[in-house]
Amino acid sequence: MTVRVASYNLHKCVGTDRRHDPERIIAVINALQADVIALQEVDKRMGARPAALPQKLIEAETDFIRHEMPRTGPDSLGWHGQVVLVRRGSKVLDVEPITLPGLEPRGALAVNIVPDSGARFLLVAAHLGLRRMDRRAQWSRIARAMQEARPDPALAIGDFNEWRAKHGFEALTGFHIHEPGATYPSRAPLGKLDRIVTSPGLRVVRKGVLDTPVTRIASDHLPIWADIGGIRHRPQFD
């Protein structure tokens, strides 16, 4: 079996045309045809961090559910601007909010997911800092969470804010880093800032960047996706 995971930094629903258009973001989310999607910058940045992408719109216009997860504030959709959406029929067993070290307030979500097929895995959704020294410390924390998931497979996905191919990932010895393609800036993408990290045993069967006329204007990032194989069935006991 394969599971399609995706990641999208939706830039608070403000496109490169400077329009705040949540409906356009929803169209991109649906076009990804993912089983699980990690979203970044779902909340406004200032004040109480209210949601930029309304949860009611997700529920009405997609086949995804926002399971109960930590929120930065009472009116936020995400934790440090991040949320993980799971397609209806799948289960979220538990969620651990991770506070990441560094100069800026950053966080990640460690989500144990059982897709409709019944195969359990850990997904860490992350939006890392702008300074490489911070990202190195953040990767150390994320790698520890992925190692602690054993024997379940684990992957990390998100906006990693790293322009280089090899630097900054020293904590990920034994893991595999995948670059679906250039995602930033969306109108003329050069940087492969959005990536996937997999634990041993997982396979990236297919991967790509959703590059369309709509995605080039809906946000300043293009979304990524990957079909992940190697997530074997493991009986669950309640």
Image: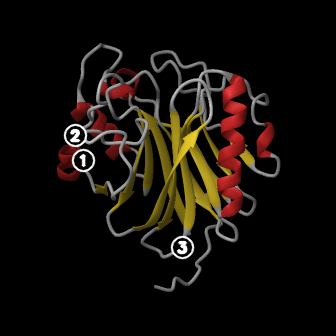
Q: Which mark is residue 114?
A: none
Q: Quick check: 85 above or below 25?
A: below
Q: Calculate the distance from the C-alpha at mark 3 to the C-alpha at mark 2.
A: 30 Å
Q: Secondary structure at mark 3?
A: loop
Q: Which mark is residue 58?
A: 1
Seen at 60% across and 48% down, the residue is 156
The kind of residue tagged 3 is Ala
Seen at 62% across and 74% down, the residue is 232
Nearer the observer, 31 or 82: 82
Question: Could you classify mark 2 by the number of other residues whose Cα lies within 10 Å: few (under 14), some (14-19), or many (20 or more)?
Answer: some
Q: Secondary structure at mark 1?
A: helix
Camera-near label (3 vs 2) is 2
Question: Could you classify mark 3 by the number of other residues whose Cα lies within 10 Å: few (under 14), some (14-19), or many (20 or more)?
Answer: many
Q: Calculate the distance from the C-alpha at mark 2 to the C-alpha at mark 1.
A: 7 Å
Q: Is residue 174 left or right of residue 217?
A: right
Count the marks.
Answer: 3
Do labels 2 and 1 touch, CB within 8 Å? yes
The kind of residue tagged 2 is Pro
Camera-near label (2 vs 1) is 2
Residue 185: image x %, image y %? 50, 18
Seen at 44% across and 54% down, the residue is 36
Residue that carries the numbered disc 2 in the rendered image: 54
Residue 47: image x %, image y %? 30, 24
Residue that carries the numbered disc 3 in the rendered image: 119
Residue 18: image x %, image y %? 29, 13
Q: Quick check: 56 above or below 202?
A: above
Q: Can you say which quadrant of the picture contains the N terminus? A: bottom right
Dividing the picture into quarters, in which one does residue 103 lie?
top right
Q: Calculate the distance from the C-alpha at mark 3 to the C-alpha at mark 1.
A: 25 Å
